[in-house]
Amino acid sequence: MGRKLFGTDGIRGIANTHPMTAEVALNIGRAVAHLFKRNSHRAKIIIGKDTRISGYMLEQAIVSGICSMGGEAYLIGPLPTPGVAFMVQSQRADAGVVISASHNPYQDNGIKIFSSDGFKLPDEKESEIEDIFLNNRLNNHLPQPKNLGKAYRIDDAEGRYIVFLKNTFPRELSMEGLKIVLDCANGATYKVAPHVFWELGAEVVTIHADPDGLNINHNCGSQYTDNLCEAVVREGAHLGLAFDGDGDRLIAVDENGNMLTGDQIIAICTANLKKEGRLKKNTVVTTVMSNKGLCNTFKEMGVEHTMVNVGDRYVIEEMLKAGAVIGGEDSGHIIFLDHHTSGDGILTGLQLIAVMLKEKKPLSRLAKIVTIYPQFLINIDVKSKPDLATISEVQDAVREAEEKIGGRGRVLVRYSGTQQICRVMLEGPDREQTEMLCKNISRVIKEKIG
């Protein structure tokens, strides 16, 4: 059966529109409770969310579905996605559900599912949920009234997660004397992140930490760092950290107000791990979106580098297979498997600051480890997603770009797994040429399927 609900990062769409409706959420709750039930054991499921207004609707629907299937729902309220993964393990739950659309605008929402080990579900498990749901296999498994489930609320989830995060920071280091600006994207990190860095001794300035249900990711957070760059310079801070709406991404800003990409953060942390003999298997895993400059840096470092399809799930799967301890995406999803099972923006910020303190260098100097190739990324809204290989005009434009760039860069054209978007990415040594070729491919795609 083809996947009809799940994309590269769970289910996602416009709230109150299929598939992000209360009806679908209820049946996903039922399917999860059924899938993770073991004999007479009631499925224990943790439910967290970000700060979107639609989270209330979807949360209650999922709880209803879980209870109607005899499961037990444990609500923890707004908490970063990696915080939910942590709570699943901490509470020895059978599964976790996150209601979030990550970096998307407020009108979108999504559902992500974690298994008991704190990892996101593999494709086959998501397909099994789709099969249970779409083929109407749920009604045959509804329990008798006496066996219906209950819902509970865990009030100290934030505190537990804060302690977990602080314990990932080296005990011999202190943030005293460090000034940090945090951009919480009006999202799930708005309570936890300021506490973590303040309790470790830093002077913390927080922006975009006043969610109202509608302002999550709006001109703020990891995708819109202009305000953070300005705030770092204005405050005379040592660095700035920007999270996305659900807190699993991090983009950093150095003391001069310059933004660091996820690739640069990965390189900085990888170099430190290798220096300290902690880079297991001497391997790093990233995605095909990583900059060519990062690939060159790893060659110079003598580090094995594996690239996989876009999606932090696929990065983690390859990390587990290869025995790697660090991997991630240029977008800021970075995984430290020695610490956590999920990309975690706050945790990544802690590891980055630890390197700054160990090396006694400002972030601007550490960032020079990578020479970033000029890169242009254009997102085109599309009405449908036909196989790009069947559109001759698109293939001609791609071939032309590849011939002109040659082996000095890359051309990558792909559909988003979470939005109705086609992404065109080009890298090359010449900025003007790279931008022109990127715009040409984008124009053709817009004419054909936009």
Image (cartoon, rainbow, N blue to C red):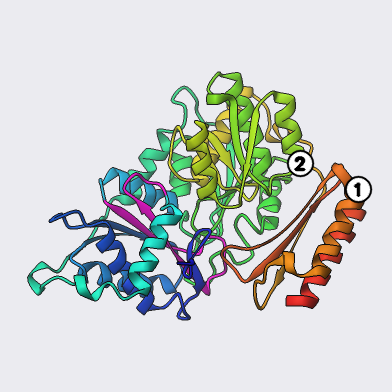
Q: Marks 2/1: CA distance?
A: 13 Å
Is residue 295 found left or right of 189 in the rendered image? right
Splitting the image into 4 quarters, where does residue 354 fall? top right
Observer-nearest of 288 and 328 = 288
Q: What type is the residue that disc 1 sits on?
A: Asp
Q: Examine the structure image and report whether residue 18 is included in the region drawn in magenta.
A: no
Q: Earlier in the sequence, mark 2 or mark 1?
A: 2
Bounds of the magenta span? 94-119
Splitting the image into 4 quarters, where does residue 254 fall? top right
Q: Is the residue marked by circle 1 packed among few (<14), some (14-19), or many (20+) residues within 10 Å?
A: some
Q: What type is the residue that disc 2 sits on?
A: Lys
Q: Which mark is residue 292?
A: 2
Is residue 328 visible in the rendered image? The answer is yes
Image height of 131 relative to 353, above or below: below
Observer-nearest of 282 and 400 = 400
Residue 362 is situated, as x and y percent measured from the top left of the image, at 68, 31
Q: In this figure, which residue is indicated by the disc labeled 1? A: 430
Quarter of the picture holding the N terminus:
bottom left
Residue 32 is situated, as x and y percent measured from the top left of the image, at 31, 62
Is residue 431 visible in the rendered image? The answer is no
